[in-house]
Amino acid sequence: MNQDSTNIVIGVLALQGDFAEHIKMLEQCGVSAKAVRYAEELDHIDGLIIPGGESTAVAKLTDEGSAPIFSAIKAKIAPSEKVGASSAFSTPVNAMPVYGTCMGSIFLAKEIEGSSQGRLAVMDIKVKRNAFGPQRRSFESDLKIDALGSEAFPAVFIRAPVIVECGPKVQVLSAIDEGIVMARQDTLLVTAFHPEITNDLRVHQYFLGMVQEYRQAQSTAVRDSQVPEPAQV
Ligand code: GLN
């Protein structure tokens, strides 16, 4: 984090799952973090984390239509104008960065293998739930993730999904034999594993870098919109 990280506020969707661990992790990264439960709260954050948990439970909330927060999140994610390609990714000025962990990745996926359960369906990925089978539900594995540096990342998988297909705009950041376990599409980031229950801050710091890019794209857009028209002669 190079500049101005202190006034970044990250929301963590707190309807279900391990949101408290993400909040602690974000605080350790030096940013403010707050639990988000209502649509209005999305207006006061710079980025959102959707934690791990049980996707069928959250899907039920969407099916019941009891949570206007889902349509509000979708509206914040869906970009209509692309501004600023600061890296291999574009940072749409009006697309709030969102990081989905495990269940969060299922919830962001356009497709879930063999299921039509409720989800946001915003990222061009197809996921397979519980991809490691019942007998190998939880395990830890050292992952090579170039985007995080040369040191392996201690990834904890808990009844995890994998990404089995992704669209051309999706960059694979880490894959194992069973499938893709970390990926990014512009302002969307997903991991099949749970960095929030390790002591390694690097995935959260990577996401905060995306949030900084987004804020820069926003302030550039505001500045450009304020440039006066040249005087007519
Ligand atoms: N297996 C869960 C699901 O399908 C995800 C588990 C997790 O988030 N750790 O929703």
Image (tube, grey):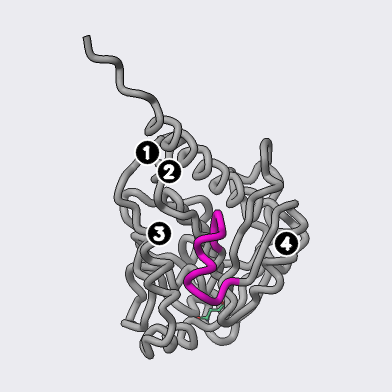
Left or right, 92 with respect to 55, comes to left
Q: Earlier in the sequence, mark 1 or mark 2?
A: 1
Ligand 1 within 8 angstroms of badge 3 C-beta: no
- Find numbered disc 4 in the image and state the secondary structure of the residue it sits on: helix
Q: Amino acid at mark 4?
A: Met
Q: Which residues are magenta?
A: 36-48
Q: CA distance from mark 1 to mark 4?
A: 30 Å
Q: Select label 1 or label 4 by which is in front.
A: 1
Q: Could you tell me how many numbered marks the image carries?
A: 4
Residue 77, numbered label = 3
Residue 54, numbered label = none
Other residues around mark 1 within 10 Å, as few (<14) / some (14–19) / many (≥20): some
Other residues around mark 2 within 10 Å, as few (<14) / some (14–19) / many (≥20): many
Q: Which quadrant does the C terminus fall into?
A: top left
Which residue corresponds to mark 2? Answer: 91
Q: CA distance from mark 2 to mark 4?
A: 24 Å
Q: Amino acid at mark 3?
A: Ile
- Quarter of the image for residue 88 reads top left
Which residue corresponds to mark 4? Answer: 25
